[in-house]
Image: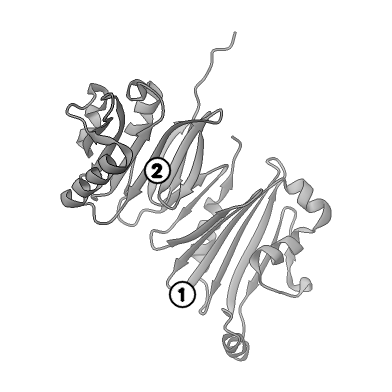
Amino acid sequence: MTPFINRWRSIGWNGLTLSCPEKWEAIVSGKRHLLFEEDFSPIFELRWQTDGSSKSSADSLLRRLEKKAGLCRQGAICPAWLPLEKVYEVIPLAAEENGEQKGALLTCRHCETSLLLYFFHTHAVQDLDLQEVLSSLNCHNRKGQDTLWAIQDFRILLPPSYQFSSYSFAAGLTRLTFHHSGLTMHLCRLAQASLRLQTTPLADLMVLLSGISVPKEEIAHHLQFVYHSNHPSIFQQILTRLRRNPPFHRMILRHHPEHDRLSGLFFEDKKPIPENQVNSILNSYEIFSL
């Protein structure tokens, strides 16, 4: 009999990274809120904030947790969590009614990010997988290091200057938006590519997702992707600016038949789009099997 292998994968969302078992599903519940489930049963949730993380704000958060959630500061930290204290100030949180540890408030000693954990299972703090997950937590990068975004079945690396703006998880369509100076970048990931391509060609899907109308004859077609880049003349730049549209854009939509997925990146700016940066981002954008 082949022994069971507990495979792990990396999760990255809005500045926070960790590793978790592949059997766990990471669900985005907010810009700084992740929920982890296994077989539709919640395991723990994680919230974090990157500003106002001083001792006074931590004390204020503890008062709110006690009032609204019935969680209070627990005296002793679980021995298995002691290694976390090298990186975080750890405050265990217990349920008022029975004293069982139900969560923890972590404050990073390096960047002062506050992380709030809440556990849904009894004796969760003793779970070896959960201990491994917590030991992998990272809430800051080295200066200049790209930020990992890895959720669902895709991953991408973005420069730290790219500011997260919005997200949506519709039926089969994931869309993230980022801003960098005057540049706007939209990331798209579509499931069930085969069904979508039965009725709509890849080039038409690119135009629909980007919201940018371009002549079909100008779209470059390759084996598994379509592409369009706009470098307008001065006169064309003036016209598009009068219409309040960014004159420069680069967009690409790729088909991943081995995963039955589509992945798209769409860049818009009022000035020329940095080619090397865009190529680096594009090369880092992967779809993988779960």
From the viewer's perspective, is 221 left or right of 55? right
User: Please, which residue is most extreme toward the top here?
Assistant: 1
**Residue that appears at 67% across and 68% down:** 228
Residue 40 placement (x, y as % from top left): 55, 31
Quarter of the image containing the C terminus? top right
Amino acid type assigned to the residue bearing label 2 in the image: Thr
**Residue that appears at 75% across and 58% down:** 202
Tag 2, which secondary structure? strand
How far apart marks 1 and 2 lie (CA) works out to 27 Å
**Residue that appears at 71% across and 74% down:** 214
Which residue position holds label 2?
Answer: 17
Closest to the observer, 221 or 51: 51
From the viewer's perspective, is 198 left or right of 93? right
From the viewer's perspective, is 128 left or right of 167? left
Amino acid type assigned to the residue bearing label 1 in the image: Gly
Which of pointers 1 and 2 lies earlier in the amino acid sequence? 2
Residue 236 placement (x, y as % from top left): 63, 87
User: Can you see residue 142?
Assistant: yes
From the viewer's perspective, is 25 left or right of 144? right
